[in-house]
Image (tube, coloured by chain):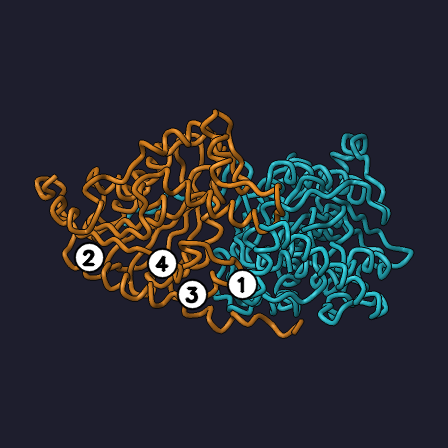
Chain colours: A cyan, B orange
Amino acid sequence: MREAPMIQAIAKRELMVLDGLGVRLQGTYHRPAGGLSVASGAGDRVGILFVNSLSLPRAASGDSAVHWADAMAMQGYPTFRIDLPGLGDSAGNASTDLLDRINGGEFASVTTAVMKEIVSRFELSGLVVFGHCAGSVSAVYAGAATSECRGLILLDPYFHLPQAKRPRLREELSGWARRSKVGGLLSNLYDRTKKVSMRLRGGGPPGNANLQLLARWKQVATAGMPVLLLKAPGIKAQGTKPRVGEFDYIDHVMKLAGRRNRVSAEFVKGADHSFANRAGREAVRKHIADWLAVHFPLADFGARNKSNAALRARKDSNESDESQTAAEGQYCAVEGR
Amino acid sequence: MQGQGVAVTNQLHENEQVEERAGYFAVSGAHLYTVLHEVAEPLARVLLVGPFASERHNSYLPWVRWARFLAAANIEVLRYDYRGVGESTGAFEAMTLADWGEDVTLLSAWLKERGPHVPLVLHGLGLGAVLAGRAFDAGVGDGLLLWAAPANANQALRQTLMRWVGLEQIFKFGDDRRSASDYIRKLEQGSPLEVDGYTWSVRLWQESFRFALPAMLASEESAAQAYARPVRMVRLTREAAPLAKGGLVGFDDLKDFGWLYGPNREWILAAASMGPMSREGIDHA
C-alpha cells in the first residue's frame, strides 16, 4: 500500500489532533507571522481559539473562520480552530438536541480541557475564545470555567433559550407576514402588543432567558475580562437595539457587566447573521484587529498595531446607525427566534 | 450540565476503530484538505465528491457520518474539500469547474494507487455528482454512485442560489426581498455575485452551462448500456435534507440517515464484489 503523500503542515497552517476528554478532536493551527518562539515573547502571548457555531464545521459559513484566523495569525497571534466532539471532523456523534446541550453549557468542560492543552503545548499565557451564535454560548461558559481564558470575542451572542425548530404554523405565518403588506402591518401590530406586554411584565428578562448563561456572563464580565461583542443587524432591529417588543439583551448584559467591565459592544453594519458576507467579514476582521491590539498587544507587532488601533468607544444605547434588515442568516437554527 | 462531560463520548469508540487521517494534498497552486478513513484490508475504496461550496457546510455532518458508516464496513473512504473551499487553500473566485474536475482525477489516481486490486467507487453528491460522473465517463473508477445528480453544473448552482435566496428572504420584508432571477440577471449582465460568502465569478456561471453530466448518465438504464461498470443513481427527496432540498442546520443535519446509508453501502459492497475493472474494451462507449 502506498504511503499517503498527504502532509500535515503547509506554509501557514498545520493540522492538529487534540484530546478532548478522551475524544479525538481535529483542529487547524494558523501559525503566527514571525513565528512563535520564546525569544519572540511566546510565553507572554495569547492565542485565539475558535469553537464551532452550532453544528457548522470549523471553517464556518463562507469559510469566514478561516479568513479571520489567517488574519489574526498575520497580526501575530497563534490561532486555532477546532471541531468540538461530534462536530466537523472530530470524533463522536452530536444528537438532535445539540442546541439545548450547548445552551446548557455542554461543551464547557471539553473546551477548557482543549484550552489547557493548547496553552501548555504552545507555551501561551492564555487564549481568547471566539464564538459565533451558539459558539458564543460555549465561549462564555468556557470563559467562566478556566483561568486560561483571557478574553472573549462573541459574534451575535444570544442569552435566551431558543427552540431548534419552530412550529410549522408559526413559520408559515411569519413567511406570510414578510411577503404581504397586510401581513407586515399585522406583524408590526404584534410587535407593539409584545412591547406592551413586556412593559406590564416589569422590564425584566423574559421567561425563556438563559439564566445559567447570564450568571456565567456576569462572572466573566464583572471580573474585567476583555470582551468584544459584535452584533449584526437583526430582523426589524435598529443597531444593537432589538426589534420592537423583544427584550434588549445587549442592554441587559451591559448592565450586568458592572462598572469594571471591559466589554466593547459594536454594531456591524452591512453584516448578516453569519458575518460571512464580504462586508461583514471585513468589518469583523477590522474590529478584532483593533481590539486585540489594545487588549493584547504583542511585543513584536505592538508598535505597528497600536498606531492602527482606533478602538471604537462602546456604542451608547442610542445607536445611530440604521439597521439594514439581516440578510443571509441561513444555516442557523437559532437566528430569528 | 456544565462539568458533566460530553454526551457524545460513548459513541466515540466505535468510530475510533477506524483511523481518520486529515492531511493536505498538493495540487496546482493550492492544497486540498483531505480526510482518509483508513481501513487495513478494504473491500472497496470510495472517493466522496461532496456538494458545492456553501452546501458543504450544510451537509458536512451527514457526509462525515456516511464516510464513517462505510469505513465501519471495511470500505476505505477519502473525502476532501474542493480547491478554494473549506479547509482547502486557494481563492474560490479564481477557481473553475475544470479545476475541481482535476481534483477528482488526481485524488482518484492516488486512491487507486493505494491498492490497484481493490475496486474504486466514485460517489458524488450534487455538483460532486457531475464531477464524479465526468471522471467516470473518462474511465476513472470501477463503480459510480450518484446522489441528487443535476443535469449540469448550472442546475447545481441554481439549487444553491435558490436555497440561499429562500433563506435570505426569511430575513427580508416587502420590497427588500429579491428573487433568484434578480440575482441571475446580475450574473448574466456580467457582475460577480456573492452567495453565502462565496463570490461566484461570471466565468464560473458561464462555464456551468457547458459542464454537464455525460449524456449516458441520464438514467441507470442508459448507463447500463454505455458502461460495463456498475452505476447507481439516487434521487434525494426532502427527507434527505440537508443533503438535498433545504433543511435546517443544527437540526436536520443531526438526524439519523441510516435509511439512506444502509442500502447504498450494500450497493457499494455488491459493486465491489465484481472486482476492479480493466478500462480497455469493457465499456461500450
Front one among A126 and B69: B69
Marks 1 & 4 on one chain: no
- What residue sits 77% from the left and 44% below the top? A296
Placement of the C terminus of chain A among the 4 image quadrants: bottom right
Q: Are marks 3 and 4 in contact (CB under 8 Å)?
A: no
Please state the chain letter of the residue tagged with numbered disc 2 in the rendered image.
B
- What residue sits 76% from the left and 41% below the top? A322
The amino acid at mark 3 is Glu
Q: Are marks 2 and 1 in contact (CB under 8 Å)?
A: no
Q: Earlier in the sequence, mark 2 or mark 4?
A: 4
Please state the chain letter of the residue tagged with numbered disc 4 in the rendered image.
B
For the residues labelled 3 and 4, the Cα–Cα distance comes to 31 Å
Helix, strand or loop for disc 2: helix
Q: Is residue A93 visible?
A: yes
For the residues labelled 2 and 4, the Cα–Cα distance comes to 26 Å
Helix, strand or loop for disc 3: helix
Task: Specify the label residue A107 is tagged with.
Answer: none
> Residue tagged by mark 2?
B272
